[in-house]
Image: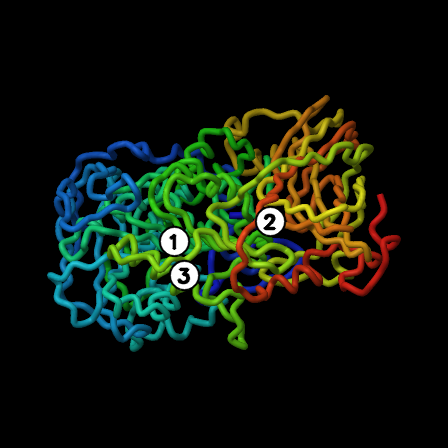
Amino acid sequence: MAPRIPLTESTQPNTGRPLLRTGHTQQRGRPQPNTGRMLLTGLATVALACGTLPAFAPAAHAAPGTPLGTATADTAAPGAVTSPGGTTSPGLRSTSPGARSANVPSKTGLTFAPASLRNPRSVSWNKHANWTEHYFKTPDGTILHADVLRPKGLADTVKTPIVLSVSPYFNHLADLGIVGLFTEGRMATVLNPTIPNHPTPRFQDFINGTKLLEQGYTWIQVDLRGNGGSTGCLDSDGPGETQDTITAVEWAASQPWSNGRVGLYGKSYDGSTGLIGAAYQPRGLAAVVAQEPGLGSYIYMYNNGVPYYNALGTSISYNEIAASPGRPLRDTPTYMQNSLYEVKHPECLSNNLRLAIDNDRNSPYWRAREFVPKANKSPVPLFVTAGLIEDNTYPDGLVELLHNRLGPTRAWLGMWDHVRGNDVDQHGKLKIGRPGYFAEVMDFYDQYLKDKPAKGYPNIIVQDNTGRWRTQPQWPMPTRTVTFSDGPTGIVKYGSAVSARIAGGGAAMAQADASALNQQKGIWRYYPAQTRDLHISGNMTMRVKTRYFGPTGKYDPMQMRTTLWERMRALLWDGASLAVNVYDVAPNGKTLLLTRGATIVRHGFSDITFQLLPNDWVLRKGHRLAVRLVSTNSEHFMPMKADEPIRVEYSSLRVQVDDGRHQDTYGGVPLYYRVYMNAAGCYPAPNSPCNPRGGSLDDAPTP
């Protein structure tokens, strides 16, 4: 979940949450600055949210994690609805030690009628699939749409395990809505009435690549509320989407053609709904696979109160996706009517944009969207992939998700960007660099959905900055903490500064562009060279004592601001920020970004402790740690203008260190690893060489 300024994604295997960024181009998998898209999708929404509409109260939702109601769901169109939700489906087995999905009380309280599989259609991108569409209700009355793909030739009475994804990206028109038709070049195809309709092939790579249907699984993809064929107001990670995920799992598990066990699957946004499922443990959920998941909407939009560019752009993007219709001339009247719900209820769009402009993580809006602590304490088996240097869904919150997690946990962690475990480049090279992802995923699902013996894959596989791949039982496994005291002190002036040449989407900014943006060098502290390797693994925490007496930094509760304009003004003009960049400086002067973070600076005297992004990084013998303080990182954050300089009177950095010995495993070089180590991760100055043979220690950036 961490973005910047607006966006495009594709329906190809690399897609994930739309993400925003400014000042440079990006590649697939992360939304880009796109003036046309902003104009097309944002102007109406902005006008609504700026005050032309009143502040609408959000629709009431039943509290997640408690019984959500006793109403009987019914269909909005012929096909599917409800079946006795309180019954125990035969054959349900343990999802983890001590937890059986059949014995978990229903979180919805609904009964679901059998969904008919009659009159299936074929799927253009999978010849083994029979496709049917269904509708069912959540406890608050929202109608959800589902595309069901069953193995062709399999009798309707045969019970299979279910792999399910719950997402905003399954609209039959295009996964990114109307604008996606232009960016994906699909307009002519979608508007051609002679070309049959089909479910969106977002996970065609997984379904076809694993031969999922041939292996006896059923695939289901469900539209989140406000998207595709589902009604309701979009509600990113909120109580509404929590209901959707819970209800979708329980509906799928209750079907007479299901064996009662459901595995959630997704990447990025729909990886997040998988974690929501793990957090709330709906009846029937047996396992979750989440690739590069967003770890919460707040930390996708803010870093310790400092807004990323996407604090505005993300909501605009998802409003456009939600407001997009189904496929004209091919989708049913019911689907088309449901797909226009946001158009008929513009308050959904204005609220989604306005309410997210709130940098207070403790506000009721954001507290209702926290799911990582619950997912950490969940017994549901979880398989996660996460790029530790990725620039879309940053690993902010990854330690809180994985460390000492209750349920069985597997993970691939390493030096890659926002990609899937199976993604390859145009030459067929794996972007993550390690083969066998689908084999491990299917071993995981087979174990928990089919009771097959596991093949003994490692729990956690980690690749660090040295290129080494290793295995360990959990992550992180700190043996001690190290504090780098006496950090940089002095005056921090407001101005443009960039932490590194990161451009997003697996790319690097040109040296000249990065240097031009890096106007404020900030204040620095270089620590002595390491006398032995220091393996930093996990969280890093910064403490600063500041003195700031500018007119900004005086805050009122954001909930008191009723329009978007008032909220944006409060966010950017009432605040001041301080950014921290931590570097690994090699003996030859090569300066690589190890981690970064930012915090709000309050008016007056402040003693602030805040968390930076986690990583797994070996600071080699002879290398030095450097800490830099600046007012902002212009490639990541919206500017929060400090009208007076910020005086830093004390600073220190605390890191988790792993001195343990771990077993090596196989793995190649992730494609982004080379880009990051040779360009993207480098400090943007001509005298900071980004090749192993260039420069000298004297050429390193100076305070």
Q: CA distance from mark 2 to mark 3?
A: 34 Å
Q: Secondary structure at mark 1?
A: strand
Identified by mark 3, the residue type is Asp
Please give the residue where the numbered disc 1 appears in the rendered image.
289
Q: Residues within 10 Å of mark 1 (few under 14, many from 20)?
A: many
Decide if residue 529 is in sight here.
yes
Residue 374 in picture, x, y percent from top left = 40, 36
Which mark, by number, is residue 389? none
Residue 46 in picture, x, y percent from top left = 52, 45
Of the two numbered discs 1 and 3 in the rendering, the one whose residue sits closer to the viewer: 1
Mark 1 vs mark 3: which is more N-terminal? 3
Mark 2 vs mark 3: which is more N-terminal? 3
Which residue occupies 17% across, 54% down?
80
Please determine whether, in this image, residue 486 is positioned above or below residue 5.
above
Which is nearer the eye, 312 or 438? 438
Decide if residue 269 is in sight here.
no
Identified by mark 2, the residue type is Asp
Which is nearer the eye, 28 or 102? 102
Mark 2 vs mark 1: which is more N-terminal? 1
Identify the image's colour scheme: rainbow, by chain, secondary structure or one colour. rainbow
Q: CA distance from mark 2 to mark 1?
A: 22 Å
* Res. 100 image quadrant: top left
